[in-house]
Amino acid sequence: MKIVNKLHLLVFFVLLGSLCSCNHTTSTKTPKKNIYFNLAELVLTQVHLLDSLKPQVRKYIRSENSEENKVIQPEKWSRELYLFREADINKSAYYGLYVLNKLNDSGMQIEDYEAQTDELHTRKLTVSRKPGKTQPSTISIVVKRENVLYHTQRDLTLVFSDEPRPRLKSYVIRAKQSSVFSKKNDFEIKGEIVYP
C-alpha cells in the first residue's frame, strides 16, 4: 500500500511540474517578416514566373579546360536558381549579423549588406535599384565557405529587366574552389533568359 501511495505522489508531482513549466504567456510582439532584403522570396517569385513562361536559357560555361555555349530548356527553374535562393540572409537567426550601408552611386540606389562574422556563408549581398524603383535592377552576392581543408568562393549576380513587372534577364555564377586534396577548380556560368 505504501508503494502505491508513493507512486501516486510521484506521478502527481511529475504532472504538476509539467503543468507549471508550460509557458502560457503570449507575445505581443510580432516578428518582422523582412529583417533584411528577402532574396529567397524574390527568387521564388521569379521561379514561378519562369516555370509559367517556359523560356530557354542561352548558357555560356567556362571551366579551366573547356568552354561551351548551349541553349537549354530548364525543367525546373528552382534547380537552375538554387544557389541564389540558398544565399538568402533574411532569416531571424541572422538578426544583427549584417550591417546595411545605403548609398547612391552613378544614379543607382544601393543597399549593401555585409556579414559581421566569417562564420556566415553569405558574406555580402548588394541590391542596386534605379531611382524611384522598388524592384532591384541587379543583385550581387558573395558566398564563401572555408576551413583548413578547402576554400570556395562564389560570386553570384542576378540582372532584371526594367518592365513594369520585373523579370529575370540574366544570371552569372563565378566560382573558385581549392582543396588540399585536389587542384584549383574555377568556373563560370552565364545564363541569358530567352523569353518566347
Image (tube, helix red, strand yellow):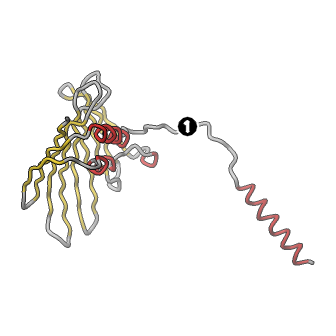
**Residue positioned 17% across, 48% down in the render:** 72
- Which quarter shows the N terminus? bottom right
Compare residues 65 and 35 and report the one nearer the observer.
Answer: 65
Image position, residue 117 (x, y; %): 35, 52
Relative vertical location of residue 188 with respect to residue 46 in this rendering, above or below: below
Count neighbours of disc 1 (C-alpha within 10 A) and say few if under 14, some if 14 to 19, many if 20 or more: few
- Whole-percent x, y for residue 91 in the image: 43, 46
59 shown above or below 34: below
- The residue located at (11%, 58%) in the rendering is 63
Camera-nearest residue between 149 and 133: 133
Quarter of the image holding residue 166? top left
Judged left or right of residue 75, residue 120 is right
The residue at 16%/50% (across/down) is: 189
The quadrant of the rendering that contains the C terminus is top left
In x, y percent, where is residue 25? 68, 44
- Residue closest to the eye, 33 or 96: 33
User: Horizontal placement of 116 versus 196: left or right?
Assistant: right
Furthest-right residue in this view: 1
Mark 1, residue position: 30
Q: x and y percent of residue 28 in the render?
A: 61, 36
In terms of secondary structure, where does tag 1 sit? loop
- The kind of residue on which mark 1 rests is Thr
Q: In this view, does 12 lie to the left or right of 130?
A: right
